[in-house]
Image: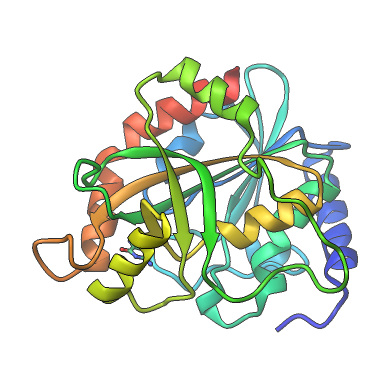
């Protein structure tokens, strides 16, 4: 549980990364969630790769398949990107500031845009495993916020219409949906998935919404893209398993990598 002021810690992390990469600033940051790892190699050339635990405020994710490095990459366009390969989930118990740390560090590094990817469950029968969905809005069902104090951040258009339009230029067939974040780490009961559906959620996961809130507080444009790895409980023909999640991600990897690289190029 970090006790240092989150914004000061983010500045320390940003200074560390900028020095290690020999750059002044980055233009964009990406969080690669379950199934999106393969995209990194298509995103320009690595400038520096840092073990998460060496960077102030970061920890190597304890979750299998969630990596543990931060990489600065130089894109074909000449822009610099920070790949946050060490997402902290709320269910890891490190506190909500730790969940938002990567986003805040990216903002302190000068990023203007953030691409959040994740793996999730689907409450839409037509959206089976392997479906990529653009986020158009979210339901934060965690009961918390990364923001402390009377800072009433507006979340209208939290998922940038401009960036979604770019994504649709790259792939006009990308569906759009509403993502609900549950605290986890347990999966939802069938009744909870039905509740989420009734509340307007198309997708259910355990990440993203708190990161988006922190990004909007910092003034970053956000693009959220989910990879459906499973039908949510009650919609799935069999009990959920983390192995199924990783398998669906691995299979969709190459297609997602191309999509993400093409969006970043725009
Ligand atoms: N809450 C929740 N999170 C998930 N993450 C993945 I990957 N699949 C799911 C799911 O079905 N529910």
Q: Is residue 84 above or below residue 258?
A: below
Q: What residue sits 26% from the left and 75% below the top? A: 191
Q: Camera-side residue: 111 or 73? A: 111
**Residue 248 appears at what percent x and percent y?**
24, 49
Q: Quadrant of the N terminus?
A: bottom right
Q: In the figure, is residue 165 to the left or right of 182?
A: right
Residue at screen point 34% across, 59% down: 197
Q: In the rendered view, would you say 94 is above or below 69?
A: below
Residue visible at 28% across and 66% down?
194
**Residue at 66% across, 79% down:** 95
Where the C terminus falls, by quadrant?
top right
Q: 215 left or right of 232?
A: right
Ligand 1's quadrant = bottom left
Indicate left or right for 241 with 185 as reference. Answer: left
- Please tell me in which quadrant of the rendered image residue 25 appears: top right
Counting from the top left corner in percent of width and height, residue 203 is at 37, 53
Residue 22 seen in the figure? yes
As drawn, the residue found furthest toward the front would be 198
């Amino acid at each position: 549980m970090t006790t240092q002021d989150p914004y000061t810690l983010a500045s320390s992390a940003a200074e560390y990364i900028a020095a290690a990469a020999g750059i002044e600033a980055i233009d964009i940051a990406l969080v690669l969630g379950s199934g999106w790892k393969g995209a990194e190699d298509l995103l320009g050339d690595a400038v520096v790769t840092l073990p998460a635990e060496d960077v102030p405020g970061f920890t190597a994710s304890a979750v299998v398949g969630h990596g543990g490095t931060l990489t600065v990459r130089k894109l074909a366009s000449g822009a610099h990107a920070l790949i946050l390969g060490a997402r902290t989930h709320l269910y890891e118990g490190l506190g909500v500031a730790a969940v938002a740390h990567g986003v805040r560090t990216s903002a302190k590094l000068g990023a203007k845009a953030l691409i959040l990817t994740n793996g999730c469950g689907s409450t839409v029968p037509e959206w089976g495993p392997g479906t990529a969905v653009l986020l158009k809005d979210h339901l934060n069902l965690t009961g918390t916020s990364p923001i402390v104090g009377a800072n009433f951040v507006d979340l209208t258009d939290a998922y940038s219409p401009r960036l979604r339009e770019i994504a649709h230029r790259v792939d006009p067939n990308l569906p759009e949906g509403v993502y609900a974040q549950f605290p986890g780490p347990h999966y939802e009961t069938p009744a909870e998935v039905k509740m989420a559906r009734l509340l307007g959620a198309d997708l259910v996961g355990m990440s993203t919404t708190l990161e988006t809130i922190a990004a909007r507080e910092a003034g970053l444009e956000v693009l959220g893209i989910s990879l459906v790895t499973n039908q949510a409980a009650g919609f799935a023909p069999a009990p959920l398993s983390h192995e199924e999640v990783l398998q669906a991600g691995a299979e969709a990897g190459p297609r997602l990598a191309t999509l993400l690289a093409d969006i970043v190029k725009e």
